[in-house]
Image: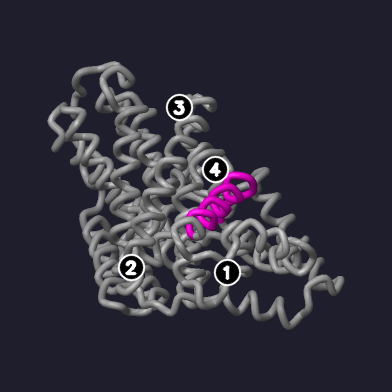
Amino acid sequence: MIFSTVGDKGSPSVPLWKRAVRAPSVLDWIRIGLLFIGVGCVLTGLLPIAEARASVERIAPLMLFLVSVIVLAELTKEAQVFDVIAARLALLGRGAYPALFLLCVAFASATTIFLNLDTTAVLLTPVMLALAPRAKIAPLPLAMTTVWLANTASLLLPVSNLTNLLALNKLGLSAPEFAVRMWLAQTVAIAGTMALLWLFYWRRGVRGADRYEPAPPEPIRDPVLFWGTGAACLLFIAAILAGLQIEVAAIVAAALSVAAYLVRDRASLRPSLIPWQLLVFVTGLFLVVPTLMRHGLGDLMTWLVGTGEGFAGLLRTAAAGAGLSNTINNLPAYVAGEQVVPAANLDQLLALLVGTNVGSVITPWASLATLLWFEWCRRRGVRVPMGKFVLTGAVLAILLLPSVVWVLALT
């Protein structure tokens, strides 16, 4: 999923409408094109109107949730909550890289689990990259921690990834039940990611320094907004764990944050908070993929995914999900794979989630969060060696998938 990030408020001399609206990027035009193709599929009869309506109705509650949680995350970042946490983590580490590593892993994992992977990739990435020069830390280890855990830590809760939300109705599980089913697999995924992050990016021979210099945190501009949005996030997390409907929890938390800004800083409530790119992309996707499934993709997916539920069958499903994710993207890979998994094979559907969530770490386009992460690295001038990115991501996926699927099969 893709959404715009909140930038600087801009100069007061620039008209508000110009500051609120930015020119579409190349990715934006791709999303718009996908929507037009999807609408064209309906108009030409390639996708029957009844199927198109059912597909859009399925994602409507998810879109409501995602818009709400993105607004919540954007306003929380604007209130400096993420910045302060990142700076405090550096201070807690006291110059020791192993301590900083554990703290960054915990921060990125928690953000992914409770606020979804795009929050981690898009909002946490600039915070971590801004922290690097202030604390004289090499930026690449921080950046790779963010992008890998944005994907591999997205198994635990339905809110962690759009693929999880899509699977929830078919699985017939509540959020707490989903967490009970996936917690051990999620633990293994994070542990494996930590081991390879340290080996490839954090150990002394790679990072090039023995210690770092913690930088003092910047002062909080508005304590009311800081504590108000922070409390809204905690309320959202508590509501999810209590089993409240996720869209209701997100709407209430976002409304509380918006109310705080209405009182303290109305100028920050600008149109760019609404993730129109997300709405356009996902709507187009849910028109195009069903069309392709009717015209040949379904047979290919049936052959790739199979129907087995033993360890070998689950691993085959996860590998198919990972392979398709790194070929096209994890969201269409999941949507296509879900269509051919038998309704009774719930373990196979969970294995598909493992493949599309944990396995989408090899190519830059495997997940939309990774694409946006690359954009932030480019903006900050952080060079990401593409060869190393692909190679280490492949090692991560190859090692993680069997172990996570094995744990899933055991439980």
Task: Depth check: give the residue in front, 161 or 275.
Answer: 161
Q: Secondary structure at mark 4?
A: helix
Q: Earlier in the sequence, mark 3 or mark 4?
A: 4
Residue extending furthest toward the bottom: 50
Image-based side of 54 in relation to 179, left or right = right
User: Would you name the residue on which mark 1 appears?
Assistant: 341
In percent of the image, x 52 and y 62: which residue is there? 274
Give the amino acid type for the residue marked by disc 4 in the picture.
Leu
Numbered disc in front, either 3 or 1: 1
Q: Are marks 3 and 1 in contact (CB under 8 Å)?
A: no
User: Does 359 appear above or below 297?
Assistant: above
Marks 1 and 4 sit apart, C-alpha to C-alpha, by: 28 Å
Please state which of residues 39 and 84 is positioned toward the viewer in this rendering.
39
Residue corresponding to mark 2 = 181
Q: Residue furthest right?
A: 44
Of the pair 396 and 378, the residue shown nearer to us: 396
Mark earlier in primary sequence (2, 3): 2
| Labels 3 and 1: the sequence-earlier one | 1
Percent from the top left, x then y, of residue 243? Answer: 30, 78
Q: Is residue 76 above or below residue 392?
A: below
Residue at (72, 63) in percent of width and height = 299
Looking at the rendered structure, the kind of residue marked 2 is: Arg
User: Helix or strand or loop: what does disc 2 sit on?
Assistant: helix
Eyeballing the image, is 384 above or below 3?
A: above
Q: Which residues lie in the magenta part?
A: 314-330
Locate the C terminus by quadrant. bottom left
Q: Secondary structure at mark 1?
A: loop
Q: Between marks 3 and 1, how big is the CA–CA gap?
A: 41 Å
Q: What residue is disc 4 on?
A: 371
Work out how far the residue at label 2 is from the one at label 4, CA to CA, in angstroms.
Answer: 30 Å
